Amino acid sequence: MPDPVADHAGAPLATIAAALRRERQRTGLSLTEVARRAGVAKSTLSQLEQGAGNPSIETLWALGNALGVPFSHLVDPPRPTVRVIRAGEGVALTARDADYVATLLSTCPPNARRDLYLIAAEPGSQRDSAPHLPGVVEHVVLSAGRALVGPADDPVELAPGDYCTYPGDQPHVFRALVPATTAVLVSEHV
């Protein structure tokens, strides 16, 4: 019999369900209020808290913002002291409207305020990101390919080895210009 909280498309549903319940209880917010603040249907949030569904990056970012926690706190399970994530492994989540996959590599450990992602993107629709929590700054190092990255109204073109930083609490984009574009993204929280 299939497990209702099994992973779908890389999304760790059991981890997401537990994190959503934990963070909602921590804030004292009702299911209705979190759904309203995140702009998602109450039924969607209820399904996610039960370990069902297939959440997009956008849905999880919105829920993280509504709960006042970084996106990574919703998808990263507890981990050992030494951790290796091989290429092709890790918690990979896809964007709804772009050929864009963000693989969470590392979340904020105690006394740190950053999350680390590996980005894989293909040409076509760009990844439009809504503003994250106030004070978030993103850092991108392009590993392969070419991409337009940064503020939605003024992205910059990056080539392999280029670095860019920009306010993550404002609308921003990532658009692959050639196939097999990859980058490392650090989301820094204040």
Image: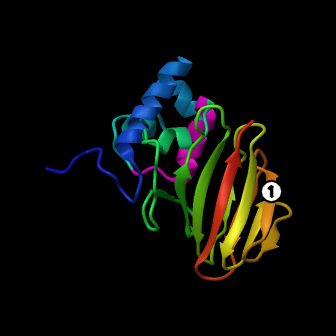
Q: Is residue 21 above or below residue 189?
A: above
The answer to whether residue 179 is seen in the rendering is: yes
Corner quadrant of residue 126 = bottom right
Give SS at disc 1.
Answer: strand
Q: Residue furthest front?
A: 82
Residue 151 on the magenta span: no
Q: Residue furthest top?
A: 28
| Predominant SS of the magenta segment | helix
Residue at the spot x=47%, y=67% of the render?
A: 87
Image spot of residue 132 (x, y percent): 70, 43
> In terms of depth relative to the viewer, which is nearer, 8 or 80?
80
Residue at the spot x=53%, y=44% of the render?
A: 60
Q: Residue furthest bottom?
A: 178
Image spot of residue 181 (x, y percent): 62, 76
Q: Is residue 82 above or below residue 143?
A: above
Corner quadrant of residue 101 = bottom right
Image quadrant occupied by the C terminus: top right
Q: Residues within 10 Å of mark 1 (few under 14, many from 20)?
A: some
Disc 1 marks which residue? 165
Image spot of residue 177 (x, y percent): 69, 79
Residue at the spot x=39%, y=48% of the render?
A: 12
- Number of residue marks: 1
Residue 58 on the magenta span: yes
Image spot of residue 26 (x, y percent): 52, 20
Q: Magenta span covers which residues?
A: 54-67
Task: Tell me: 151 left or right of 39.
Answer: right
